[in-house]
């Protein structure tokens, strides 16, 4: 079945460092891809999305590009801030299944 | 303010004592869903509902029940909780045509002793 694999955390970076969180997927159809973020003590929030190959999703300085050839959707940010500390979930959805499949999450901690 | 609310936020109970976690949304969303979050496993879907009186099993439905009698409410029922249901639970909702852009509640941390 469809699945999402994320890099294991935790990831610890200094403020203003470059961030990459890897995400790859397995899907039989043509899924939409998402990054959700969970700040401490809160529910998940949609961060960005891409619905077809080569689409780039972006929000709050984060970007991810839908790469069909490598089945990847890596999350990047050029200069992280302490406020970016959170757990990040990569996810996919297939319209035929009417559901979202989440990865296991990557905890990100940013040092001042 | 558009939101999904859950109650209670924290609950400690004992094995076998029936409990209900409520979920309510004020966005007139058709789609609602329950997830559990466990370390290293991410979020797993328990049940979902596409509309009133329509519910379906997710990936881990065993030991849980749901109902959707009104559009805004989607309670999660544990008839006989067991320790392996200790987890963090999230309710989520979305519109029918954008079901994958879900709004999440703040979570309910359940401990079953």
Image: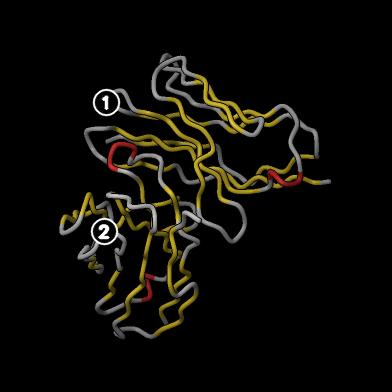
Where is residue B98 shown, x and y percent of the image? 34, 37
Binning the other alpha carbons within 10 Å of mark 1 as few (below 14), some (14 to 19) or many (20 upward) gives few
For the point 23% across and 38% down, the residue is: A97
Binning the other alpha carbons within 10 Å of mark 2 as few (below 14), some (14 to 19) or many (20 upward) gives many
Chain to which mark 2 belongs: B
Residue that numbered label 1 is attached to: A28
Q: Nearer the viewer, mark 1 or mark 2?
A: 2
Residue that numbered label 2 is attached to: B71
Above or below B78: residue A3: above
Above or below A90: residue B102: below
Helix, strand or loop at mark 2: loop
Q: Report the side of A110 relative to B69 (left or right).
A: right
Above or below A24: residue B59: below
Where is residue A43 shown, x and y percent of the image? 51, 55
For the point 54% across and 27% down, the residue is: A74
Where is residue A16 shown, x and y percent of the image? 80, 34
Q: Which of A76 and B21 is in front in this view?
A: B21
Q: Which mark is residue A112?
A: none
Image quarter where the N terminus of chain A lies is: top left
Where is residue A94 shown, x and y percent of the image? 29, 32
Above or below A49: residue B8: below
Q: Report the side of B69 relative to A111 (left or right).
A: left
Helix, strand or loop at mark 1: loop
Q: Do labels 1 and 2 share a chain?
A: no
């Amino acid at each position: 079945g469809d699945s999402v694999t994320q890099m294991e955390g935790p990831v610890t970076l200094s403020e203003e460092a470059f961030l990459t969180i890897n995400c790859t997927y397995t899907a039989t159809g043509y899924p939409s891809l998402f990054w959700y973020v969970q700040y401490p003590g809160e529910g998940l929030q949609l961060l960005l999305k891409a619905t077809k190959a080569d689409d780039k999703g972006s929000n709050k300085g984060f970007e991810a590009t839908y790469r069909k050839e490598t089945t990847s959707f890596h999350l990047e940010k050029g200069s992280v801030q302490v406020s970016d500390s959170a757990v990040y979930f990569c996810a996919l959805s297939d319209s035929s299944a009417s559901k979202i499949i989440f990865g296991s999450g990557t905890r990100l901690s940013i040092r001042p | 303010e558009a939101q999904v609310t859950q109650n209670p936020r924290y609950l400690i109970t004992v094995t076998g004592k029936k409990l209900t976690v409520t979920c309510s949304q004020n966005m007139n969303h058709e789609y609602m869903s329950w997830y559990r979050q466990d370390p290293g496993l991410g979020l797993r879907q328990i049940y979902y509902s596409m509309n009133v009186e329509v519910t379906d099993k997710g990936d881990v439905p065993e030991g849980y029940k749901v109902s959707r009698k009104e559009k805004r409410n989607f309670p999660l029922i544990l008839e006989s909780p067991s320790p392996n249901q200790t987890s963090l639970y999230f309710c989520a909702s979305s519109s029918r045509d954008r079901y994958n852009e879900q709004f999440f509640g703040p979570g309910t941390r359940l401990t079953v002793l």
